Image (cartoon, rainbow, N blue to C red):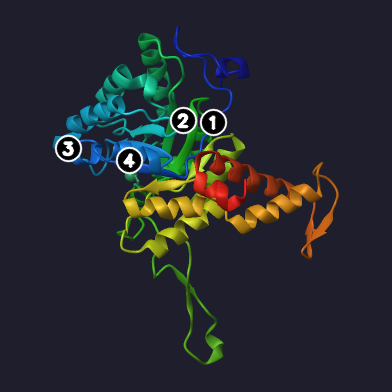
Amino acid sequence: MKTPSAFYKPLAIGAPEPFREIPVSLERMIHFVPPHIEKMRAKVPDLIEKVDVVLGNLEDAIPADAKSDARNGFIQMARDNDFGSTGLWTRVNCLNSPWFLDDIVEIVGAVGEKLDVVMLPKVEGPWDIHYLDQLLAQLEAKDGLSKPILIHAILETAEGVKNVEQIAAASPRMHGMSLGPADLAASRGMKTTRVGGGHPDYAVLSDADDGGARAAYQQDLWHYTVGKMVDACLSYGIKPFYGPFGDFSDPAACESQFRNAFLMGCLGAWSLHPTQIGIAKKVFSPDAGEVEFARKILEAMPDGTGAVMIDGKMQDDATWKQAKVIFDLAKLVASKDADMAVIYGF
Ligand code: GLV
Ligand code: MG
C-alpha cells in the first residue's frame, strides 16, 4: 500500500497532478460508436448535442481486421469535433490483446488533450489499473498534457468482482466502473446467451399449497454484482454504471434494467443503439415528482437536522441526505439539459 501522500503524486516527472476529486460531469449515457465506419463517424456532431458521453469503441464488436481502422477512426473523430461539455471516451482493447499498447500510445499521442476517460475492459485486479496508470503518466509527461486522463474499469470477470474494492481504490485516476454482464456471464460460467437483462428461468415460485397454478417471479440476475460494485465505488468516491443491454427489440426490459441500476446507485448506462439514448436519459434523470418532493424536504429542514412530517411521511437527517442526492443530481441534469430544467422548474 502506498502512503497517503504518495498516492496523489504524479507517476512520471512532468505528468499532470492527479485529481483529488473526480470532476463533476453528467454521464447518463455512454454512447458507443464504432469508429472504423465512416457513416458512424459522420453522426458524431449530432451525437455531441444528444448524449452525455461519446465513446469510440475499439474492443469487442470491432472485427480483428478493423482494429487499426477503428483506432485511426477514433483519432479522426476526436480531431474533427469540438466536444464541449460532452465527454470523449474510448474503450481500448484488453491488456493481453495484441492491440492494447498501440491503442494507448497512438491515441494519447495524437489526441490525449481531448480525451477524458479510457475505459479498460476485463480488469481483474488493481495490478491492471497500476499498469495503465503508470503508462498514462509516462505518455502524459512525454506529450505535455495539462490534465490527467481518467480510467474507467469494466467489471466483467469473476476475479474482477472478487477484487472490486481494490480496483476502486487502485489510483486517483479511477473515474468509476461499469458492469459488463456479457463477459461476466461467460467468466462465471452462467448458463445464459444474453447481453445483460434478466432471464425467464431465474425465478422463485409461489408456495405450493394454494391449490392453483403457481406464480413464478423473475429475479434480477445482476442485483448482487451491482450492489457490490456500488458499495465499492461509493466508498472510494468513484462512479458506478450499468453497462450494455443487448436486446434492442425490448425497450421495456432495457428501461427496467437501467432503472433498477439507477435506484441502486448507478449514474448511467451504455447506449449501444440510438433508441437507448432516450431510455437512459429518461431513467438517469431523476423523476420530476421525486425532485419536487426532495425540494420540499430540503426546504422544510434548512439545516438538515430534526424531524418533520411531509405528506404523512417522516423525514429526518437521513431522508434529508437522500433528498440532497436527488436534488443535486437534478441540478446537474438541468445544467446540461434545457428540457429537463423546464420540467424541474429550475
Ligand atoms: C461488456 O463489455 C460486456 O461484456 O457486457
Ligand atoms: Mg465485455
Q: Residue at x 39, y 50 (%)?
A: 277
C-alpha distance separating marks 2 and 4: 37 Å
Instruction: Give, as a three-letter code, the residue at label 3.
Output: Ala
**Helix, strand, or loop for circle 2?**
helix
Quadrant of image for the C terminus? top right
**Which residue is labeled 2 in the image?**
126
Mark 2, mark 3: which one is toward the viewer? Answer: 3
Q: Which mark is residue 46?
A: 4
In the picture, the disc for residue 41 is none
Disc 1 crowd rating (10 Å Cα; few below 14, some 14-19, many 20+) is: some
Q: Position of residue 28 (x, y in %)?
A: 47, 45
Q: Are marks 4 and 1 in contact (CB under 8 Å)?
A: no
Residue 247 visible in the shown view: yes
Of marks 2 and 1, which one's residue comes earlier in the chain?
Answer: 2
Label located before the other in sequence (4 or 3):
4
Could you give the CA–CA distance between mark 4 and mark 3, rounded to whole angstroms? 28 Å
Cα separation between marks 4 and 1: 36 Å
Q: Nearer the viewer, mark 4 or mark 1?
A: 4
Q: Residue furthest left?
A: 65
Q: Nearer the viewer, mark 2 or mark 4?
A: 4
In the image, residue 344 above or below residue 331: below
Depth check, front residue: 200 or 39: 39
Whichever of callouts 2 and 3 sits on the residue coming sooner in the sequence is 3
Image position of 78 (left or right of 304): left
Q: Residue furthest bottom?
A: 211
The answer to whether marks 2 and 1 mark residues whose Cβ atoms lie closer than 8 Å is: yes
Gap in angstroms between the C-alphas marked 2 and 3: 27 Å
Q: Amino acid at mark 2?
A: Pro
Residue at label 1?
169
Residue placed under numbered mark 3 in the picture: 64
